[in-house]
Amino acid sequence: MTRILLLSMALLSFTACGKEEAKPSVCSTKPIQPLQIIDRPIDFGPQRIAMTKEYIKTHYGMNVENIEITPKIIMLHWTADMDLDKSFKRLQPEKLLSDRKDIVKASALNVSSQFMVARDGTIYRLMPENWMARHVIGLNYSTIGIENIGGKENKIDDLTPAQRQANIDLVMYLKAKYPTIEYLVGHHEYRQMEQTSLWLEKDKGYRTVKSDPGDKFMTDIRKGVKCLHLKAPPKGQ
């Protein structure tokens, strides 16, 4: 009788284990492998490097030997142009294009970004990840920029599910590679970062109004990388 009772208890225990749900996976900052990144370099020769150093001196008050940065922020953007090649060609030249009258007074250095994500989610690396790119006022010296092809007429969040997943994967990759990264910020939120020690802009009149990539996109990406505990910008501005 005792033997039958023990057998019944063991069977009951085995059945219970079989029904137990798997525990949720623990988030890891281990680099995603394989994360496919295609190198498609923009023009970044001695002239652009020299202009970047001058930009750092003028706007941030620092004399630097090189343009390497310690990343603290990941900044997400959209291009407002639906074409990958056209968007790339805007960033490719070393000098700013003539139609950028809104920022040309600050510097002739062309805008740039470390990464660009196509509509199908393909990730392109445009320049060395830890070189300073000009893509956001006040924060370039600590920020890695990710441009997403889209944002038609600079108003609509029309970024694709593939781009959303690519941004999540890329943020995971970058945080694993650069543990110094603390913030995940949308371009439209950049002025909120004036409240932090990372804000360096000396020209109080040099500001722009941005709408990219929008609250919905940022909410989606932040949910996707919640386990990394990256900070959003301080509220109140």
Image: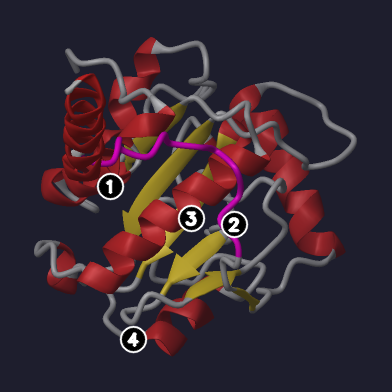
Marking on residue 221: 1
What SS does tag 2 mark? loop
Q: Is residue 135 visible?
A: no
Q: Secondary structure at mark 3?
A: helix
Disc 4 residue type (three-letter): Asp
The CA span between labels 4 and 1 is: 23 Å
- Category of crowding for the residue at label 1, using alpha-carbon neighbours closer than 10 angstroms: few (below 14), some (14–19), many (at least 20): some
Q: How packed is label 3: few (under 14 Cα within 10 Å), some, or many (20 or more)?
A: many
| Label 2 vs 1, first from the N-terminus | 2
Q: Is residue 26 magenta?
A: yes
Task: Name the quadrant containing residue 235.
Answer: top left
On residue 108, which mark appears? 2
The quadrant of the image that shows the C terminus is top left
Residues at circles 3 and 2 in contact by the CB criterion of under 8 Å:
no
Which amino acid, mark 2? Ala
Task: Give the residue type at disc 1.
Answer: Ile
Is residue 5 left or right of 123 when viewed as pictured?
left
Would you say 46 lies left or right of 164 here? right
- Inter-mark Cα distance, 2 to 1: 33 Å
31 inside magenta stretch: yes
- Tell me the tag on residue 59: none
Looking at numbered disc 3 in the image, what kind of residue is underneath it?
A: Leu
Identify the mark at residue 170; answer none if there is no mark: 3
The mark lying in front, picked from 2 and 4, is 4
Residue 83's disc number: 4
Cα–Cα span, label 3 and label 2: 30 Å
Q: What residue do we see at 45% from left, 77% from top?
A: 122
- Of residue 16 and residue 7, the one placed in the foreground of this image is 7
